[in-house]
Image: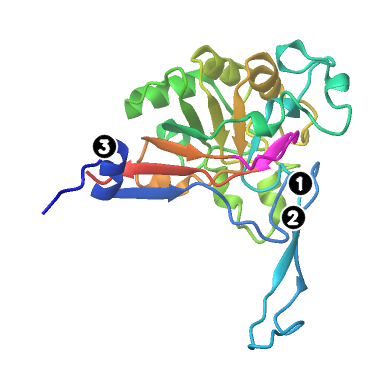
Amino acid sequence: MGTTARTADRLLDAVQAGVTIYDLGRRLTVGMPQSPNHPAFGLTLPRRHGDMVRADGGSAANDLLVMGTHVGTHVDALAHVSQDGRLHGGADAAAAQVGGRFDELGVHTVAPMVRRGVLLDVPATLGLDSCEAGYEITPADLDATVSRQGTPVGAGDVVLIRSGWGRLFDHEDRNHYIGKDSGVPGVGADGATWLAQRGVHAAGADTIAFECLPPGKGHSTLPAHRILLVEHGIYLIETMALEELARDEVHEFTFVMAPLPLYGATGSPVRPLAVVSRG
């Protein structure tokens, strides 16, 4: 009786041995909190069961989806932000968007990510449940978190910064999470420079704008976006669900994420995963 040979695949072996998967994406629902700068999420049923019934009794329903590409958990492509009329690499922003799409730096150019992921749980380092509204996470906070967790950040990593603000995502008043008046915690220019100096591939957070929003300032200035997207070509992932990772003290994992191949778009909804071997 013959045997079937197969090429050994360590990743497949690890999966078959058992993994725990953490879903880092938010559920997309009508009325969920989001940046006021982007088209809201809407979902309708233009065709319902019973509108048309086949001869055998079968019926089908389908949906119409309308939403901005920076709503819910999403990734920012390098085309998303310009500075002084220039995109990452010096491309002219006005010329790049002729035709209504970005051929060179659109989200279709963001390759699927399977990389080392690191959660930096800043509130745990500070002895808090959550950073205060408008709190700027400093390089000293990041260094202290790396030291406490024993998770150095290296080139090519995907670094997820927990502020604890994500706990407000499901608050009955969506304005709490948006934080227009109160401000929202996150890294500022110095924290973004800290990430860039370590050569990270992407950075994510549990807030709608990734970076610190001072009270009452809204999105008037976004220096971390400039430093990371424009100056260093580092992707940003926003509105992430990081509470389960923090609860289980999972600070290092395999990070998996793939944007939708929306040709020429400035961003894409995503459903990132943190995968950990049970062994």
Closest to the observer: 170 or 233?
233
Q: Which residue has dot 3 on it?
A: 7
Above or below, 12 relative to 42:
above
In this rendering, which labeled residue sits more in front, label 2 or label 3? 3
Type of residue at label 3?
Thr
Residue lying at 70% horizontally and 43% vertically, measured from the top left: 179
Q: Which residue has dot 2 on it?
A: 41
Q: Can residue 212 be seen in this view?
A: no
Determine the secondary structure under disc 2.
loop
Determine the secondary structure under disc 3.
loop
CA–CA distance between discs 2 and 1? 7 Å
Magenta stretch containing residue 261, yes or no? yes
Which residues fall within the magenta stretch? Answer: 259-268
| Of pointers 1 and 3, the one earlier in the residue sequence | 3
Q: Where is residue 218 in the image (x, y as percent from the top left)?
A: 77, 36
CA–CA distance between discs 1 and 3? 43 Å
| Of pointers 2 and 3, the one earlier in the residue sequence | 3
Please give the label number shown on residue 68: 1
Residue lying at 78% horizontally and 21% vertically, measured from the top left: 82
Determine the secondary structure under disc 1.
loop
Q: Residues within 10 Å of mark 3 (few under 14, many from 20)?
A: few
Q: Where is residue 254 in the image (x, y as percent from the top left)?
A: 39, 36
In this rendering, would 79 be left or right of 116? right
